[in-house]
Amino acid sequence: MSEQTAQEGTAGIRRVVVVGAGMAGVQTAVALRERGFAGEVTVIGAEPHQPYDRPPLSKAVLLGKAEDSAFDLDFDALGVDLRLGCEVLGARPADHELDTEAGPVPYDVLVLATGAEPVTLPGTEGVPGVHLLRTLDDAERLRPVLARQHDIVVVGAGWIGAEFATAAREAGCAVTVVEAADRPLAGVLPAEVAAPMTRWYTDSGAELRTGARVERVE
């Protein structure tokens, strides 16, 4: 798409609001500016931290090699209104307005880039020793857990599970990874591509158990 075509496609649009300050939301804002959109761009994030890349959380941040993984972007220079620590409560499409904790936000175009929520296991809420890993705060809470070199079970052999398992092994933990599917990354990659990924676990010294669905946590 040429810059002229992009400008024509956004003619009459004055305000774009992006809900979600992760990779997708930030890249949407950057792409709008790169393609010549001159209207208002607002990015709303529920977390108070500067927008950051999530994959490095499971290694660099967990192991204390980095304090964060913030994107190297100047949002002021881009002319992007970045609103952090602001939870979106709902949308009213008929009125072209978002409801947020800080009040209504009008829009002409709304982009939902909120990402996915981690899958929780029934009965694990509030159970000592059970942790979720999705946010920067989660990674910071897990640092001392790895430092104590516990025996660790990772549920899920996706990207984050693999990164966390190798980080935990590097920290000196004994790691077992359980995956309900018959191979790692079964939901995102075909078998012939995903099969070699099992070497990640072998090379790091983690034990991978596939076809192992979690029934309960005691």
Image (cartoon, rainbow, N blue to C red):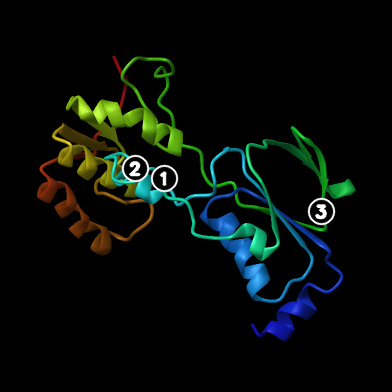
Q: Nearer the viewer, residue 194 or 172?
A: 172
**Disc 3, disc 2: CB below 8 Å?**
no
The residue where tag 2 is placed is 61
- Inter-mark Cα distance, 1 to 3: 31 Å
186 versus 179 height, above or below: below
Q: Amino acid at mark 2?
A: Val
Q: Looking at the image, which residue is at 33% across and 49% down? A: 159
**Which disc is residue 107 wearing?**
3
First in sequence: mark 3 or mark 2? 2
How crowded pointer 3 is (Cα within 10 Å; few <14, some 14-19, many 20+) is rated as many
Dot in front, 3 or 2: 2
Q: Amino acid at mark 3?
A: Tyr
How crowded pointer 2 is (Cα within 10 Å; few <14, some 14-19, many 20+) is rated as many
**Residue 97 point in image, percent of width and height:** 83, 46
How crowded pointer 1 is (Cα within 10 Å; few <14, some 14-19, many 20+) is rated as many
Which quarter of the figure has residue 45?
top right
The residue where tag 1 is placed is 68
- How many labels sit on residues? 3
Q: Secondary structure at mark 1?
A: loop
Which quarter of the figure has residue 31?
bottom right
Which quarter of the figure has residue 165?
top left
First in sequence: mark 1 or mark 2? 2
**Disc 1, disc 2: CB below 8 Å?**
yes
